[in-house]
Amino acid sequence: MREFSILEIIAIVLVTKTSLKITLSVCRGLWTTYLANKLGFGVQWKPGDDVWAVVTGGTDGIGLEYCKQLAQKGYNLVIISRNEDKLMATKASIIDTYRCCRQIKIICVDFNRTDIYQKIAQELNQLNVIDVLVNNVGTLYKHPEYFMDIDPKMNDTYVNVNMLSYLKLSEIVLPKMIQQRRGIVINISSQTALFAIPLMTTYSATKAFNRFLSDGLSTEYKSKGVIIQTVMPSMTKTKLLTERNGNSWFTVSAHDFVRAALNTVGIENSTYGHWKHKLMSYIIESMIGFIGQRVLSEFTFYTLNKESFANICIKYLVFLLKIIYFYLNNNKTVIMLSNLEIVAIISITIIILKFVLSILRGIWTTYLGYRLGYGIQWKPGENVWAVVTGATDGIGLQYAKQLAQIGYNLTIISRNEDKLKTTKKMLTQTYVNCKLVKTITADFNRTDIYDDIETQLNQLAVIDVLVNNVGIVYHIPEYFVKIPSKFNETYINVNVMSALKMTQFVLPQMVQNKRGVIINVSSQASEIPFPLYATYSASKAFHTFLSDSLSIEYASKGIVIQTVVPNQVKTKLTTNVDMPLISVTPEDYVSAAIKTVGIENYTYGHWKHKLLAFLANLGISFIGRQNFSKMAFISTLNMRQIYYRNNNLDNDI
């Protein structure tokens, strides 16, 4: 038997690994789509005389199908929607069709309102056992559109309907399920949560929020007997789907999608439901792995006006099949020794190139690019302003200092008037290039502040820089049900709405000036779901998706929009979480991050955080996103236990 060379052995290992990966993906698809359910795996549905399933947005599309199929299983239903006539018609139709569904309650509320949840809680608290919650309600703009051209009220609607509803219903129902040690929560997200999609900017960001929240909660409550599943459909025939996208081969009926998705409950924590959508997700993920999320987002942006993304995926799949067909028809034997050596050389070259390029990119973005004069050309002036939110502490304060040193006039926004006065005095005395400093006292946890902010910003001649920095995080890693309800609302108001509103105010002027810089301070918690920081992680995923999409939408308009994703920075938000090896001071972090503006659209800022991100992404590529999130859970759970032990607190949930 002929001995293999080292190159041939390497090639065999790589081919075997790739073949195993493909085989496992196919087997997993077959298992989750067909075999597992037929062999009796998955959840054991337990309807009963006084057992209820709650469905939001239950009068149309996917929500209606969940109602029908849960009724068919024998559950009593609570259907929540805004149209009373549709609710009554749906109730009558289901009762007539599914005799095993004994009772149906309806709750007529508009999820675009924020004062509805006390009514919902009162109704649901009267039920004996809630076994299923389907968070389905959602809204979508009628066609792909630039962020600036969408009615600002629509963005408020996105937040209220697509995000706040999921948070509040989970807050109401989860405690009951934990007490029962039994329950199923199904959160309908979307495949637009896989990567940022320009022209569907806010929608994509809200679905990223849903995905991260759901995945985080799934890990938190698995040991409590509660199944939390994230459902990510693609093209489904509903009223939210445009006619243009409705013609895709990937499109399935709501009935077929829900039937397939329900078969995966208890088998997959995160599911694409129908086999067609699983195939589409596989194509998307392979494209992300091959060209990266940023390039895929840009590609989607440039093609979205011409054809649906589903058709793009089909073309990509056909292209791959043509390559395989050409290869097989031009090689009499598929595996030859010379071919193995070529495979090994190409594979090793790609691995080395990727590694070297990562190092060179790190060196370029961290050191060389700025020193060689690349990056943004700051243009301060007599009547040119930089606006910074959350500017009296930590990262925000350091951005204010750095921009003052460059020579910008400053508008600093924070909730503490005394701190604002102190910060203003310090800036004007320390930085002689900064001629004017205005202060706006505003608590971003309130929703009635924006008229005043908009009025004051409209008085500024030229706004050249906006730093969306204001943010909040719970003081320790904590289970979702132990975090006060009002604090989850604070996450939405401070971490989500502030960035949306401030961008709405400032972006039109920048587009008119054909010049501007928006810096969005997100977090590395936006890259994978973080259990025990579930809502925080989800809010930062929203921020990242929003920023990434806007960066692509407005690049041609002369606007630089940068996403900043720090890890641990020594601020008042991180006093109870100490990781000295990766922690950096706000001064060091912002000093490094501001040098990357115009060089990186997406930056980790400091070299320590870039190194940590590189290692994290390496780990994700080996063990997968879900397993990496579980490892994060173990780490954050340990931090929580230490805090509770040190403060003599009850550690039970």
Image (tube, helix red, strand yellow):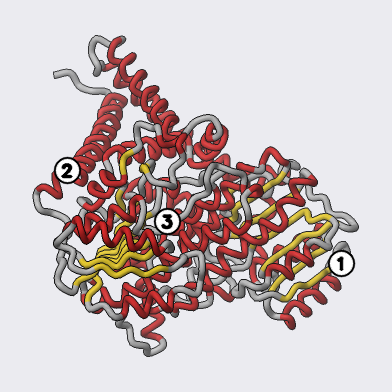
Q: Residues within 10 Å of mark 2 (few under 14, many from 20)?
A: some
- Relative image position of residue 646 (x, y in whole percent): 40, 86
Measuring 75% from the left and 69% from the top, which residue is drawn there?
A: 412
Q: Is residue 376 visible?
A: yes
Side of 502 where 314 appears, left or right: left
**Amino acid type, callout 3:** Ile
Q: Circle 3 sits on which residue?
A: 528
Which circle marks residue 34 in the picture?
2
Residue at 36% x, 62% y is 56
Query: If you read the primary sequence from the N terminus, does the residue marked by circle 3 or circle 1 appear first?
Result: 1
> Does dot 2 land on a helix, a strand or a loop?
helix
Q: Residue furthest right?
A: 382
Residue 648 relative to residue 368: left or right: left
Position of residue 477 measured from the top left corner of the image (x, y, whole percent)? 42, 73
Outermost residue, bottom side: 648
Q: Is 193 above or below relative to 135?
A: above
Identify the amino acid type marked 1: Leu
Q: Amino acid at mark 2?
A: Tyr
The x, y position of residue 576, in whole percent, is 49, 77
Compare marks 1 and 2 and give the one earlier in the sequence. 2
Residue at (36, 40) in percent of width and height: 281
The alpha-carbon separation of the residues under discs 1 and 2 comes to 66 Å
Q: Is residue 497 above or below residue 561?
A: below
Distance between mark 3 and mark 2 Cα atoms: 29 Å
Mark identifier at residue 436: 1
Q: Would you identify the image quadrant in which residue 409 lies?
A: bottom right
